[in-house]
Amino acid sequence: MNMIKNPKTSGLWRYALFVLCALQLLPAAAQQWPDKPIRVILSVPAGATPDFTARLIFPGLSQQLGVSLVADNRAGGGGVIGAEIASKAAPDGYTLFISSPGALTILPHLRKGLPYDTLRDFAPVSLISVGPFVLMAHPSVPAKNIRELIALAKAQPGKLNYASAGNGVANHLAGELFKQMAGVDIVHVPYKGAPQAVSDVLAGHMQLMFNSIAPIVPHIKSGKIRVLGVASAQRSPQMPELPTIAESGVPGFEAVNWFGMFAPAKTPRNIINRVNSAVTATIKSPEMQARFIALGADPVGSSVEEFSAYVRRDMEKYARIVKVSGARID
């Protein structure tokens, strides 16, 4: 005897079978990631500190993830160009973004109408490292330390200049904060990236600049650049003889730079967790710890939650600094 099939029951069975198959495919898809190279957007030119930091950890990340990582340098606009591209990339795990504070936690307080929202459009992955700036000078500047520089700047208001990697980046804000706290008038000259700015300081076209330690170590050793003070709260282990700016006549002054890994918002959490594990495993290896420390940076490798909280605190900090310093886009 033929059984009469209930159309409703048959439809339910087909739906259940579809859901079961979809659930079985999800873990398989997750396990397949990554199966091709991962693009890492850097909103700086080659040779800048974020680029230098990225290339330092790429070999370890490649080993951890089993695929190569390809740097995609998109400099310009104080980091806005690269950040916008990263924010609009497909959230599939094949585009990551390494950034410093400028485009994400500083510019939102200086520029209206940014083409992205830091907290909405980016998923923090891990804090890579934190390091202080040093205030460097061309040897022609007749100041050997911070106190002499302050005296010189007060005697010649508006005559000294300082370069930065661009409007709204961290070393721009460091310079504005120094001007405000030291009570000096020094002219800001923004560039389209740190390498060009450093080159002009080396050539004597610019007199001063706040910069991370790592890229300028060779120039310090060669005597082509003079460092006047370190902008951390304590002296740097790499240059213990170099006084802090805070102990040299500007009490409470501190300016640090950080580098972190982000993904576009809505990137699956399982992918973010895998990248986080790869970043932290790479950074916490003894060899990598030693290399970061030798370059004057504090290697971190944080959890996703820790870095998310860090980004929020940094946005609040720069909101205060912009207000106190009176910083503006030139």
Image (cartoon, grey):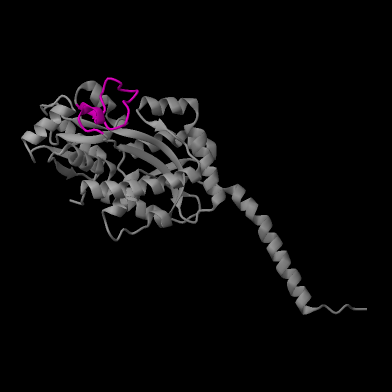
Taking the image as shown, residue 243 lies to the left or right of residue 121, namely left
Q: Position of residue 268 (x, y in %)?
A: 54, 53
In the displayed structure, 85 sits above or below 259; it is: below
Give me the residue at 64% from left, 51% from top: 28
In the foreground, 99 or 41: 99
Query: In percent of the image, x 35 and y 49: which residue is there?
Result: 316
Which of the 4 image quadrants contains residue 253? top left
Residue at 44%, 46% (x, y): give it: 309
Whether residue 77 is visible? yes
The magenta stretch is 225-251
Q: Is residue 241 magenta?
A: yes
Q: Examine the image and state in which quarter residue 314 appears.
A: top left
Q: What percent of the width, then of the height, locates residue 152?
A: 9, 31
Give the residue furthest to the right.
1
In the orientation shown, which residue stands out farthest toward the front? 251
As drawn, 16 above or below 309: below
Figure check: 225 above or below 192: above
Residue 74 can be seen, yes or no: no
The mark tally for this picture is 0
Task: Locate residue 250 relative to residue 281 in the image: left or right.
Answer: left
Q: Main secondary structure of the magenta part?
A: loop
Residue drawn at x 22%, y 21% as measured from the top left: 222
Instruction: Give the residue furthest to the left.
Output: 156
Q: Position of residue 203 (x, y in %)?
A: 15, 32
On the image, the x and y values in percent for residue 135 come to 22, 32
Query: Which quarter of the rendered picture does the N terminus lie within?
Result: bottom right
Foreground of the two, 203 or 166 = 166
